[in-house]
Image (spheres, rainbow, N blue to C red):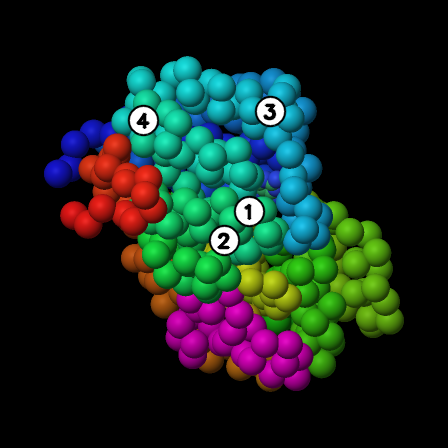
Amino acid sequence: MNHRLRVLIVSTPVGPIGSGIGGGVDMTIRALTSGLATLGHRVEVVAPDGSATVGDVTHRVAGTVQPSIQLVDRSTVVPSPVGSVLANMWSFARRSCTDFDVVLNLAYDELPFHETFELARPVAHLVSMGSLTDAMDRAIDETLRLAPWSVAMHSNAQAGTFLRGTATTIVGSGVDVESCSFVDLPNADGRVAFVGRISAEKGLRDVVDACVTARRPLHVWGYRQDENEWNEAVAGVPPHGVTYRGFVTTEILRSEIGECAALVMAPKWTEAFGNVAIEAMACGVPVVSYRRGGPAEIVVDGETGYLVAPDDVPGLAGALRNVETLSRRACRQRAETHFSTQAFAHRVEAWLQGVCGRFGRVDFSGTPLSF
Ligand code: HBI
């Protein structure tokens, strides 16, 4: 059944789309709005005031932005008080959901999960991160218990961090590959890229150490969220060892990263996916990463990059020495076949059609009906 879907996407409440605060969700929304539109579906987005225009219609909503759940500890409950932008986005969704076939939640917050069975239309949840707090674990696992089909995640590793994660649908992610310029010949100085928020969980210190050992200049693009993390990582590095290229727009990043011989990722947490990895591959840049989290499911070891034992900095350095043996064309092709917005949208389309097909068929005694 391939009928046209009308989808309302409810964005993350931590900041406007395009502000950079929304991290991976920004890219997910752009990939899904264009990918699903290409497949003939209608997509509208509700997002905080100040958001960029995405989808067929962007509904901008006022309210206090949500504190980022990445900055709290496991026992914290991140409330969604009345007047919060999250509460206001869901009031909008509740009011207008009958104009749609399905509401797609991208917020990593409790309120949307409690709304799963409250709306007059099915609610689907694309979870953006691995397990972070007990309260969110409870909300996600309860939804997986009652309506497992309504939850999707980006990688098996991410799903594995939740009690009932095996019940979820894995959809990967996607990037508009055609807007990434393929570079066959990188800069002669053998430079390497690090792209991402400068924060402890991204492992910049390991990347700097590996590049110094491999005698490769490191270029860093990203939002310097944690100045202390930056200063500690670059302390004692030889001149020109590390160059900060700024927190640039997606377009600029995609026009510059192709000059690099490799992208290095050293996630210290279970990175849910690793969008930067597919952007780099789309530009022909192989990816060297710890075998941890989403990147381990993106990289084909020895073909589109190298996977290294987690926290093995010498191993990272050793892999960096061999990146010139990899085919940059193979990286581009893998991005085109597996991680384009079309490929991602096909996976999400199939998932959302399943969610619509099962709407209203939850047996609240707790055992999902068999179909
Ligand atoms: N924190 N409370 C909260 N809600 C979110 O949706 C959220 C977040 N922190 C980070 C985040 N989303 C996005 O950057 C994801 O792409 C990781």
Q: CA distance from mark 1 to mark 4?
A: 23 Å
Q: Nearer the viewer, residue 224 or 47?
A: 47
Q: Ligand 1 near label 2 (Cβ, under 8 Å)?
A: no
Q: Which residues are magenta?
A: 290-315
| Camera-side mark, 3 or 2 | 3
Q: Which residue is identified by label 4? A: 121
Q: CA distance from mark 3 to mark 4?
A: 21 Å
- Which of the two discs, 3 and 4, labels the residue nearer the N terminus? 3
Q: CA distance from mark 1 to mark 2?
A: 23 Å
Check disc 3 and report its element: helix, strand or loop: helix
The part of the image, by quadrant, that contains residue 56 is top left
Amino acid at circle 1? Met
Mark 3 closeness class: few <14, some 14–19, many ≥20 residues within 10 Å: many
Left or right position of 133 against 25: right
Find residue 299 and report its horizontal and vertical position in percent: 44, 68
Find residue 35 and report its horizontal and vertical position in percent: 33, 39
Is 310 part of what is drawn in magenta?
yes
Q: CA distance from mark 2 to mark 4?
A: 30 Å
| Camera-side mark, 3 or 4 | 4
Residue 275: mark: 2
- Which of the two discs, 1 and 4, labels the residue nearer the N terminus? 4
Q: Relative to 212, is 154 above or below?
A: above
Q: CA distance from mark 3 to mark 2?
A: 26 Å
- Which of the two discs, 1 and 3, labels the residue nearer the N terminus? 3
